[in-house]
Image (tube, rainbow, N blue to C red):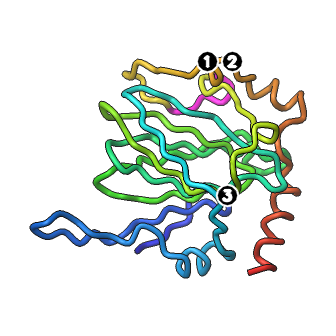
Amino acid sequence: MQVSPLRFDGVYRFDPVLLPDDRGVFLESFKSDLFTENVGHAFDLAQMNISVSKAGTIRGVHFADVPPGQAKYVQCFAGAILDIVVDIRVGSPTFGECDAVELSAEARTGLYIPEGFGHAFCVLSDSATVGYLCSQGYSPSREHGIHPLDPVLALPWPASASLVLSPKDAAAPTFLQAQESSSLPSFDACREYVSTLREST
């Protein structure tokens, strides 16, 4: 498996070695020791989510209060998606910027998104099945959203897609409203929390 850091600190992509034969393909989807070696701490799996979505569906931008936040290890099991990470950590030198990675059932790439970042994706294929390993379970009181089509964020969604949002995501606050409500995590709090994870590993 090849591990590559992306533009934001703590965000990594994991590209597995695919072993095809006449039966299909085999791969190592997640390796705890390799994850810890590169990220600097273990991944504490608390919950796994799976979503099945039709073409053009956008899910996100979602994030959770830090601490404890919710780190995610995201993979596309069927179809293809454009996965977007947004730096929403107030005080970060890259605050408000994003990075995008295409995840597909062919490449089987895993994307690790640490605590404090916003996460969203758009389905590029007719449908897509996406799995998320989560470091914390779902907690409605700690979880928040930002409108994915906010022009201030200007996320690089496919121009040709007919985009589909849930009522909850469509009603999410703008990036500026999220800042004004003080719901965004701080850069310092996120770094401090991640450092505690490293100390306990």
Q: Is residue 42 left or right of residue 128?
A: right
Residue 165, percent from left and from top: 54, 22
154 in magenta: yes
- Element type at marker 2? loop
Q: Is residue 140 visible?
A: yes
Quadrant in the picture for residue 23: bottom left
Quadrant location of the C terminus in the rendered image: bottom right
Give the number of the mark in front: 1 or 3.
1
Magenta residues (range): 150-156
Would you name the residue on which mark 1 appears? 167
Q: Is residue 131 left or right of residue 67?
A: left
As drawn, the label of residue 114 is: 3
Quadrant in the picture for residue 47: bottom right
Amino acid under disc 1: Pro
Distance of label 1 from label 2 (alpha carbons): 6 Å
Residue density around tag 2, few if under 14, some if 14–19, many if 20 or more, within 10 Å: few
Quadrant in the picture for residue 128: top left
